[in-house]
Amino acid sequence: EPSWVNNESSFRSIPLSFVLKEFERQFKVKVETRNVDLGELFTGTFSNTDMNLALQSISTPSQISFTLEGNKVLFYGDNAP
Protein backbone atom coordinates (compact mmCIF):
# COMPACT_ATOMS: atom_id res chain seq x y z
CA GLU A 1 0.00 0.00 0.00
CA PRO A 2 1.22 3.56 -0.62
CA SER A 3 3.01 5.23 2.28
CA TRP A 4 0.52 8.13 2.35
CA VAL A 5 -2.11 5.67 3.59
CA ASN A 6 -0.01 5.44 6.78
CA ASN A 7 0.40 9.22 7.03
CA GLU A 8 3.97 9.07 5.76
CA SER A 9 5.88 10.54 2.83
CA SER A 10 8.41 8.17 1.25
CA PHE A 11 11.22 9.00 -1.13
CA ARG A 12 13.72 6.93 -3.09
CA SER A 13 16.73 8.76 -4.53
CA ILE A 14 14.90 12.09 -4.67
CA PRO A 15 16.78 15.43 -4.44
CA LEU A 16 16.59 16.88 -0.95
CA SER A 17 14.96 20.05 -2.33
CA PHE A 18 11.81 18.02 -3.20
CA VAL A 19 11.79 16.35 0.23
CA LEU A 20 11.94 19.73 1.97
CA LYS A 21 9.15 21.10 -0.25
CA GLU A 22 6.95 18.15 0.74
CA PHE A 23 7.82 18.72 4.41
CA GLU A 24 6.75 22.37 3.98
CA ARG A 25 3.49 21.30 2.39
CA GLN A 26 2.65 18.65 5.00
CA PHE A 27 3.35 20.79 8.05
CA LYS A 28 2.45 24.22 6.62
CA VAL A 29 5.79 25.72 7.65
CA LYS A 30 8.43 27.78 5.87
CA VAL A 31 11.70 25.93 5.22
CA GLU A 32 14.99 27.77 4.82
CA THR A 33 18.39 26.22 4.21
CA ARG A 34 21.98 27.27 4.82
CA ASN A 35 25.00 25.29 3.57
CA VAL A 36 22.78 22.36 2.52
CA ASP A 37 23.28 20.46 -0.75
CA LEU A 38 19.71 20.51 -2.08
CA GLY A 39 20.76 18.22 -4.93
CA GLU A 40 21.79 15.44 -2.54
CA LEU A 41 19.66 12.37 -3.14
CA PHE A 42 17.45 11.35 -0.23
CA THR A 43 15.98 7.93 0.39
CA GLY A 44 13.72 7.59 3.39
CA THR A 45 10.34 8.23 4.95
CA PHE A 46 8.99 10.88 7.25
CA SER A 47 5.84 11.07 9.35
CA ASN A 48 3.14 13.48 8.21
CA THR A 49 1.64 13.64 11.72
CA ASP A 50 4.68 14.18 14.00
CA MET A 51 6.82 17.16 13.01
CA ASN A 52 9.65 16.39 15.45
CA LEU A 53 9.91 12.82 14.18
CA ALA A 54 9.81 14.08 10.59
CA LEU A 55 12.61 16.57 11.29
CA GLN A 56 14.78 13.79 12.72
CA SER A 57 13.93 11.49 9.79
CA ILE A 58 15.16 14.10 7.31
CA SER A 59 18.12 15.60 9.17
CA THR A 60 19.79 12.44 10.53
CA PRO A 61 20.38 10.55 7.25
CA SER A 62 21.25 13.81 5.46
CA GLN A 63 23.73 14.75 8.22
CA ILE A 64 22.27 18.22 8.58
CA SER A 65 20.95 20.08 11.61
CA PHE A 66 17.82 22.13 12.10
CA THR A 67 16.26 24.78 14.27
CA LEU A 68 12.52 25.27 14.62
CA GLU A 69 11.12 28.70 15.46
CA GLY A 70 7.36 29.03 15.28
CA ASN A 71 6.33 28.10 11.75
CA LYS A 72 9.85 28.38 10.31
CA VAL A 73 12.44 25.62 10.07
CA LEU A 74 16.07 26.26 9.20
CA PHE A 75 18.04 23.26 7.95
CA TYR A 76 21.77 23.89 8.01
CA GLY A 77 25.03 22.13 7.28
CA ASP A 78 28.00 21.80 9.61
CA ASN A 79 29.65 24.92 8.19
CA ALA A 80 26.77 27.22 9.09
CA PRO A 81 26.64 29.15 12.36
Image (cartoon, helix red, strand yellow):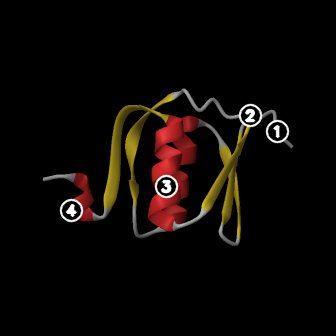
Report if the CB atoms under discs 1 and 2 are less than 8 Å apart: yes
Per the model, the C-alpha gap separating discs 1 and 3 is: 21 Å
Out of 19 and 64, give the one closest to the viewer: 19
Direction from residue 7 to residue 16 in the image, left or right? right
Q: Tell me where residue 7 appears, x and y as whole percent.
A: 30, 64
Q: Residue at x 55, y 27 (%)?
A: 39
Query: Tag 2, which secondary structure?
Result: loop
Q: Position of residue 48 (x, y in %)?
A: 40, 64
Per the rendering, the mark at residue 5 is 4
**Mark 4 residue type:** Val
Q: Is residue 58 left or right of residue 6?
A: right
Q: Earlier in the sequence, mark 4 or mark 3?
A: 4
Label 4 crowd (10 A; few <14 / some 14-19 / many >=20): few
Q: Earlier in the sequence, mark 3 or mark 2?
A: 3
Task: Kindly give the residue lying farthest to the left in the view shown.
Answer: 1
Amino acid type indicated by mark 3? Phe
Residue bearing the label numbered 1: 80
